[in-house]
Image (tube, rainbow, N blue to C red):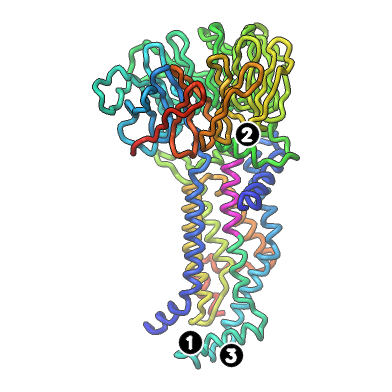
Amino acid sequence: MWDTLIIHPFTNLLLWIYSLMANVPGAFGWAIILFTIVIRAVTWPLNAQQLKGAQAMQEMQNDKEWQAIQKKYAKDKEKLAQEQMRIYKEKGINPFSSCLPTLIQFPIIIGLYQAIIRALASAPLGLLQLARSVYPTLSAAALIPLNSRFLWMDLGQPESIPIFGFNLPTLALIVAITTYIQSKLTMPASSNPGDQSAAMSKTMSIYMPLLLGYFALTFASGLSVYFITSNLLGILQYAVQGKANWRNLLPGGDKQAKAK
Amino acid sequence: MILSSRRKFTSMKPKSIFFVLVIVLAAVLLSGCSGQGLNNSWPGLASDGEIAYLASGQYLYAIRLNDGREIWRYPAKSSNSLQFIAQPVIAPDGTIVIGSAGSDHRLVALDPSSLSGDTVKTPAEKWIFSEAKSSWIAGALILDDKVFAPNSDGTLYVLDLQDGLSTKSALQKIELGGALWAQPSTDGNLVYVASVDHYLYAIDPETYEFAWPAIDLGGAAPGTPLVGPDGNLYIGSFASEVVKVDPATGKDTLLTSTQGWVWGGPVTDGQNIYFGDLEGNLFAVDAASGNQSWSIQPDGPVVGSPLLTNDVIVFATESGSVYAVDTDGKIVWQREVGGQIYTPPVTGVDRIIVAPLQAEFALAVLDTSGNQVWTFIPEK
């Protein structure tokens, strides 16, 4: 089921893009980048919905009525929850709309990682699995083996650059930095000290870069190319929609935003 | 202040737990698939008639064929950096040469003559070669005093067997390109190497020069080229065909087309050549004319090379069966061993040895009628 719905389509999409640019140096790396653009385009409405949902939640946190309710029912959590649901309903807010794109990202990440490993097939069993995954419309015999080199990387292996005897994990750092920037840019300004979603966003802006950085450090560098491309596209999307909160990148920027 | 923090924590908890669970799940799933396909493959297998050598996981095992008893294993203690999947190669002096597909890319020669007594021991390392950059998936070729060792880094390493050094350096590094997953073959004059990069190379073992320009086979060639009865080479590929190559000129001609990709190298009885494909066929093709003598459809894809023994062709399928077919294509016997069998079967004295993957045992030994004599389960 997982193979049929995720791994096979992902692998074939990667191979198809690769086949279009097989003579281009680093074709598999470009295939991953184009694949990410396709995935981003497909999930654009979801991401836009996430932004809209986050903004609506933020507006609610700054809403005077909600702040008054929070104070009024501070000791009655059940009543507070009922009031919260009422306001959600009145304002047409879906509290899960901001989580959905994040949820969708994980199967994509896992599927892409498995598709990269399968497409690169660094051992006989992997190549046999790849043979079974390729749709008949692709001339797999001519494509295989894929060239795993992209720039200075082997996309099937974790990346690092030896500098003065130390292996610097360049991609892992770039992944962590771009993830941090993206999460900071989308972090809403909140004037409500009891704003749970702002606190959550702040926590996530610290943990997500660390987590994705760890993934990039540990797993095939093809996955890092996906992370970086996805982050840059995310930043671009927020900027194009005018939602990017650039002040958050400055030290104390979030406090300035709150004060305004 | 404390109350506020506590309240915040309490009300955030379900959402936090949700995120933490998603992250942990992703980490576990990614970690779970990280090892898959990197150096994952089927076991390597060889036999000197009395002892079977099984390269499986973190060990190379030596197993006595008459009773299935483990004689020795290498290394003495398992190491995560060592993984053995290549075919072990037995030198004329009894030395066993095996490479690791783990992160430790060593090619090691073991000296079983250093062992004594009946307890399970580990043979001494006669020499180690550590200059390769990638996995050893194929067995080496020993020709006279030289070892021709193909590596996944695309280089054919040539080592001197007789220099007496315990730490080897390559006499020559012949960069071919693509991953080398097939054991080289030789007719005594040239060394032939097939590569996953679609090419067949012919190398002079003295000068290390190419005898002729590499031949594009149209698809990956993970099988060993066969030196046929007529002196020509026969090699199959993922282009779903088998070609014949004149070793004098390097000129290739199509021998026959197949339904599926050809993985294992062909074998010959002097008239026909025999090989399987991934669509689940075993073919017998007349080497001279290219006419198909017969074909049969066993119960699954045929990945490994067939074995010719006692006038029958023995081969294994991915479905876990072993077949014996006579030279007219009639099935003599069939045995369901279990697991998936990709490793080519090998022979001992009146024994056929197969190494299934994902079976309850690592090795099964059949008699010449296909009856299972014993199985081998490695002790932990």
Mark 2 residue type: Asp
Evaluate whether residue B133 shows in this view: no
Query: Which residue reaches farthest left?
Result: B117
The magenta segment: A105-120
Q: Look at the numbered discs 2 and 1 and tell me whether their residues touch, using CB distance below 8 Å.
A: no
Q: Which residue is mark 2?
A: B299
Q: Point out the tag, 3 or 1, that comes first from the N-terminus.
A: 3
Q: Which residue is mark 1?
A: A77
Mark 3 element type: helix
Nearer to the camera, B23 or B8: B23
Separation of disc 3 and disc 1 at Cα? 17 Å
Mark 1 residue type: Lys
- Residue A251, placed above or below residue B159: below
Which residue is at a point 41% across and 30% down the rendered structure image? B374
| Chain to which mark 1 belongs | A
| Chain to which mark 3 belongs | A
| Foreground disc of the pair 3, 1 | 1
Left or right side of A231 for A13? right
